[in-house]
């Protein structure tokens, strides 16, 4: 039945008979998972649409629905799905019936399980095409199957079902593509053994949504208006939102492993973020350029921190999991079903602009959109009732890519009238004029230029057409995939399983999931009313006061770490202000390590009166690595402090570990150079403040136990060896540290408790514990030690 009819069907249909005789070639489409849910909902309809769109262009097609079910069952299920195919609205019913009939005749079901099944499919395709005298153009294999099946199917296709030379192969994969960076890498490696990169089409159906697919063309066609404002000086913030009302009932076996970050943010919302933020290539239809620019933007994403996210879980989720996964009453899932994430980009265009990514299940509404909110600088002197949407600069200025659902219930692009009148493609988008009562984002629709697509196209139909046309930019390449996992991996490894905030669901959520951004940190607006009591004396921790006492006969300041850091930052600011007013400049030398990072953050976020303009930043020690190496002390100082404050460039003094294109070589005289620079700028080479840390072995700066290097002598700066990597270091010598006017030592965390105890009793034994040799000759020393380090 199925054989010998491809051409005759084309004739029968009355579709370009002359071309069919000289067919431009044949395409076989194999849908693996043809009886499944995705196939039922979207894929068969997408393939039918492809057939309708393309058959008139002279190509011929056959469609092979495949699954592991036997013929009878498979056919029954698959033809059940095919009953629901629909034609576009403008096709008259009788023609539609005919087209459907033709499509069905070109479609067969087959069981594909073994290598031999694939080999036999291959033979049949070849035989039919030979009989019909048709040239084979290509084969599409659409994997609508769970990822665990990918490997075997890929192997069979590669070994037994590849098209002949000259015809292309396109394999289409559905997410999930791994669960984290490592598993994605493994999967990618495995696929690489069977397919070339250009043969793989990874679907992210968001890239087929009409509005999402139009982001780049929109930016391109409106360059004239967007170029001046598509940057940090004009954009206040960008919201990328996918809210859903559904729960994940019947999907928990998948969802419990994935959660909202892996299910939606890592893929859909990240892809949208890239389309918004990437530098536009000259030609936005050039797949390679688009992908290259996208990858560059991935490289600009700033790493996520714990404070970049808030997580939630709808209340009924846990019972859904217990029921479906047969878990006991003591099972408490931590899988988040809601997430709000703050993303920053570290490039000149977007630095400082918050990109807020939000998604969740069982929320109050179903809607997807991107909202770009521009800064409003105008001050309007007239009463707001007279503001004109087009002229008033006081009305909000926003650009909205409305992905779907919500009040509009359609994809749309909206531009505030006081921004610009956008250029939209004729024929595919039209102005939305028939809903004057509608309000969106607090404003009447009449305040926007609003456009909707002329015809609603399903994302899968769009993507299937793009597969057929080889438009690679609509798909996720391996590099792109790994870059996305790379970005989310830190969050997934460290924080995604922290206890999420439980929310009741729907309207009842009230303001429970609202979050705010303060100083680059995200937190829920409504705080949870949980009181942590101190077991011993019933006090809440913040009732502790900073205790001032003595440590090694010197001033000791101790508190919980947060409070301690606040105290230290305030003390540094005080000293800086008084020093600047007395001598005009403040010279501080800072240590590396992790403890000072919290201090830097505190200084950045809470000390706007700090005299940075007159502050000189020096380093106490440095690792012999390039300055942009993650191990570099200066690199960290730059990342966490310098780039956020207004220290003049010429007041920043990295240690010269990298000279003559080599690291820490004696004859390059790095230590001497640094000592000379200090001598030239710091009065009496005596620092106003030296901030030290304490290692668990008693080391301080880069002066390590069991070595006498740097404990005595006149040399200010020296090379030393560390027992841990990177071994080579440059450091202030002990006598030079002791010349400072103030030396403050910051010690935090339980891991330091033992050494703090030892040092508290030790005498002056710098060879054993270099810290014990810190004893300023005419300056003062103070110890900032948190409770955990002090009390264990
Ligand atoms: C899918 C997720 O990829 O996208 C689902 O697995 C989510 O959890 C869906 O519901 C959202 O897509 P759409 O097209 O309904 O917005």
Image (cartoon, rainbow, N blue to C red):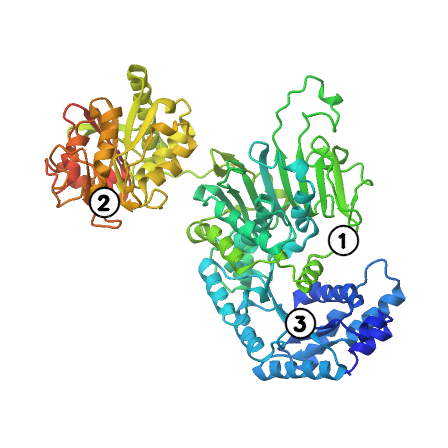
Residue labelled with disc 2? 665
Q: Residue at x 39, y 27 (%)?
A: 648
Q: Nearer the viewer, mark 3 or mark 2?
A: 2
Residue 505, how many percent across, how many down? Answer: 60, 47
Vertical comparison of 791 with 549: above or below? below
Neighbour tally class for label 2: few under 14, some 14-19, many 20 plus, Cα within 10 Å? some
Residue labelled with disc 1? 456
Give the quadrant of residue 791. Answer: top left
Left or right: residue 618 versus residue 667 is: right
Residue labelled with disc 3? 138
**Which comes before the other along the chain, label 1 or label 3?**
3
Q: Nearer the viewer, mark 1 or mark 2?
A: 2
Q: CA distance from mark 1 to mark 3?
A: 29 Å
Residues 70 and 162: in front is: 162
**Quadrant the N terminus occupies:** bottom right
Vertical comparison of 170 with 75: above or below? above
Tag 2 secondary structure: loop
Give the quadrant of residue 774. Answer: top left
**Quadrant the C terminus occupies:** top left
Tag 3 secondary structure: strand
Residue 645, how many percent across, how many down? Answer: 41, 29
């Amino acid at each position: 039945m199925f054989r010998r009819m491809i051409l005759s069907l084309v004739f029968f249909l009355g579709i370009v008979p002359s071309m069919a005789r000289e067919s431009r070639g044949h395409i076989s489409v194999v849908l693996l998972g043809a009886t499944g849910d995705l196939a039922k909902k979207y894929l068969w309809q997408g393939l039918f649409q492809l057939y309708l769109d393309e058959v008139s262009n002279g190509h011929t097609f056959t469609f092979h629905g495949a699954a592991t079910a036997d013929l009878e069952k498979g056919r029954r299920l698959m033809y059940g799905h095919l009953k629901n195919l629909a034609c576009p609205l403008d096709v008259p019913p009788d023609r539609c019936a005919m087209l459907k009939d033709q499509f069905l005749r070109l479609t067969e079901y087959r069981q594909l399980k073994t290598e031999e099944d694939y080999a036999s499919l291959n033979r049949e395709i070849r035989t039919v095409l030979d009989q019909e005298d048709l040239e084979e153009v290509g084969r599409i294999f659409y994997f609508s199957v769970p990822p665990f099946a990918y490997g075997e199917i890929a192997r069979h296709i590669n070994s037994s079902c590849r098209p002949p030379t000259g015809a292309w192969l396109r394999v289409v994969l559905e997410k999930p593509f791994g669960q984290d960076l490592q598993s994605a890498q493994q999967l990618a490696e495995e696929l690489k053994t069977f397919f070339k990169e250009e043969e793989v089409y990874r679907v992210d159906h968001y890239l087929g949504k009409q509005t999402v697919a139009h982001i780049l063309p929109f930016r391109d066609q409106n360059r004239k208006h967007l170029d001046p404002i598509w940057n940090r000086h004009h954009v206040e913030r960008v919201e990328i939102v996918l809210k859903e009302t559904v729960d994940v009932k019947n999907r928990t076996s998948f969802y419990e492993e994935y959660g909202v970050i892996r299910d939606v943010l890592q893929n859909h919302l990240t892809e949208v973020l890239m389309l918004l933020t990437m530098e536009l290539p000259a030609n936005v239809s050039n797949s390679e350029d688009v992908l290259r620019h996208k990858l560059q933007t991935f490289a600009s994403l700033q790493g996520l921190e714990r404070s970049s996210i808030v997580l939630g879980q709808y209340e009924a989720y846990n019972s859904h999991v217990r029921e479906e996964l047969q878990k006991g009453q003591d099972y408490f899932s931590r899988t988040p079903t809601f997430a709000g994430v703050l993303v920053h980009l570290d490039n000149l265009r977007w630095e400082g602009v918050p990109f807020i990514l939000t998604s969740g299940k069982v929320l109050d509404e179903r809607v997807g959109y991107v909202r770009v909110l521009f800064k409003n600088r105008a001050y309007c002197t007239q009463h707001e009732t007279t503001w004109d949407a087009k002229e008033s600069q006081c009305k909000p200025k926003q650009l909205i890519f409305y992905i779907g659902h919500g009040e509009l219930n359609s994809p749309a692009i909206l531009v505030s009238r006081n921004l610009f009148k956008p250029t939209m493609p004729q024929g595919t988008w039209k102005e939305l004029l028939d809903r004057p009562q509608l309000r969106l984002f607090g404003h009447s629709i009449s305040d926007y230029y609003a456009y909707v697509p002329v015809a609603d196209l399903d994302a899968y139909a769009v993507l299937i057409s793009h597969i057929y046309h080889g438009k690679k930019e609509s798909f996720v390449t391996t590099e792109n995939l790994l870059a996305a996992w790379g970005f989310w991996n830190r969050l997934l490894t460290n924080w995604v399983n922290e206890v999420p905030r439980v929310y009741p669901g729907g309207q009842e959520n009230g303001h429970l999931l609202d979050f705010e951004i303060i100083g680059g940190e995200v937190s829920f607006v409504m705080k949870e009313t949980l009181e942590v009591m101190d077991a011993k004396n019933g006090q809440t921790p913040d009732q502790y006061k900073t205790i001032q006492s003595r440590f090694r006969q010197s001033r000791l300041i101790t508190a919980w770490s947060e409070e301690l850091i606040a105290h230290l930052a305030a003390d540094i600011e005080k000293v800086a202000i008084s020093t600047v007013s007395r001598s005009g400049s403040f010279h501080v030398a800072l240590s590396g390590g992790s403890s000072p990072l919290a201090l830097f953050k505190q200084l950045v976020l809470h000390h706007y009166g700090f005299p940075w303009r007159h502050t000189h930043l020096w380093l106490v020690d440095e690792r012999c690595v390039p300055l942009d190496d993650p191990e570099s002390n200066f690199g960290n100082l730059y990342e966490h402090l310098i780039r956020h404050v207004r220290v003049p460039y010429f007041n920043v003094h990295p240690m010269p570990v990298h000279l003559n294109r080599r690291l820490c070589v004696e004859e390059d005289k790095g230590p001497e150079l640094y000592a000379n620079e200090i001598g030239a700028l710091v009065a009496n080479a005596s620092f106003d403040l030296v901030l030290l840390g304490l290692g668990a072995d008693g080391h301080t700066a880069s002066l390590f136990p069991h070595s006498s290097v740097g404990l005595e002598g006149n040399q200010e700066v020296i090379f030393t060896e560390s027992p841990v990597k990177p071994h080579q270091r440059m450091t202030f010598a002990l006598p030079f540290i002791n010349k400072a006017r103030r030396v403050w030592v910051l010690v935090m965390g339980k891991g330091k408790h033992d050494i703090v105890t030892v040092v508290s009793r030790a005498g002056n034994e710098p060879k054993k514990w270099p810290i014990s040799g810190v004893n300023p000759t005419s300056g003062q020393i103070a110890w900032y030690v948190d409770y955990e380090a002090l009390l264990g």
